[in-house]
Amino acid sequence: MKKLFYSAALFAATLIGFPACSDSGPDTIQPTDPAAQIGKDDIFDPTPMPPYPHINGPESIELGQLYSFKANSLYFGDTFTFTVEDTYFHNPSSYAISISTSGDRIYVVFNEYGHYKISAKSKADGSVCSYEVAKYYKEVGPLRFASNAPSLRDGFEGGGGKIFSRRLERTGANFPERVVINTMEYFTEYWYPFNGTPYMKQGANIGTVTGVAAKGTNRINLPNGRVRTHPDYDPVSLNNCALLVPFCSQEYTIPEERCGRL
């Protein structure tokens, strides 16, 4: 699919009558009560009212398409300051935006896979609301875990506190799109018994961590690991002389795609 980048998105916005930005607002802004518009003959709707302020947006998205996000508050004629965040990659070129002349709507083209956060700040009272958009590349394929963690033969002394890098690697071709995955983190225990032979054993699961890869690479970077000393280690008696070294599974899941209010 051909991507739309910033200049193309602004051109498309111009064609449909959306200027790039607008900071103007009404001279007076008064709060309104949505309940005042309800008549006695209106049919009861059990759906709860969304909190104010809030953003209405699409239920799903496709890359390269233009989408509208409408901010709402309790103030009649309220206008907003909009921001967009590329959560994992922090790259402004991965999206293009245009603000409506009314100041209450933003139009966004998403050019890359990932997770985005659209926020609107009310100019009437300063309150902020947000909306998330998550679209992920799914054809990741088999991965292999690699790291520069210390080995068992490196010994116990000086091992605690060491920070090391970790990654998941794709064999063969590089990723054609940006990648986001989740994988399980767990401890491997390095034991150094007094006057005994060092050994390893599987430790506890720690939790889920998120890894990301740029387009055109074969490497999914994971958060750095840190070697810890066993919590029951006794430096006097040398009991429980062990290190906890975090590793990650090469099995992974793709995060759930979602478009909705935060």
Image: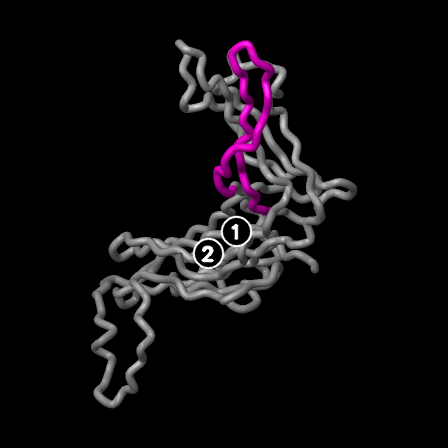
Q: Is residue 64 left or right of residue 158?
A: right
Residue under label 1, please give it: 115
Q: Which residues are magenta?
A: 180-208
Instruction: Confirm whether the magenta stretch covers residue 198.
Output: yes
Please name whichever residue, 114 or 96, is drawn nearer the observer in this view of the structure.
114
SS class of the residue under badge 2?
strand
Q: Residue at x 60, y 31 (%)?
A: 166
Q: Residue furthest front?
A: 196
The crowd level at tag 2 (other Cα within 10 Å; few <14, some 14-19, many 20+) is: many
User: Does residue 15 appear in this view?
Assistant: yes
User: Does residue 100 appear in this view?
Assistant: no
Q: Residue at x 66, y 36 (%)?
A: 145
* Gap between marks 2 and 1 measured at Cα: 7 Å
Residue under label 2, please give it: 132
The crowd level at tag 1 (other Cα within 10 Å; few <14, some 14-19, many 20+) is: many
Q: Is residue 47 above or below residue 135?
A: below
Q: Amino acid at mark 2?
A: Glu
Quarter of the image where one finds residue 195? top right
Q: Residue at x 30, y 63 (%)?
A: 51
How are the residues colored? one colour
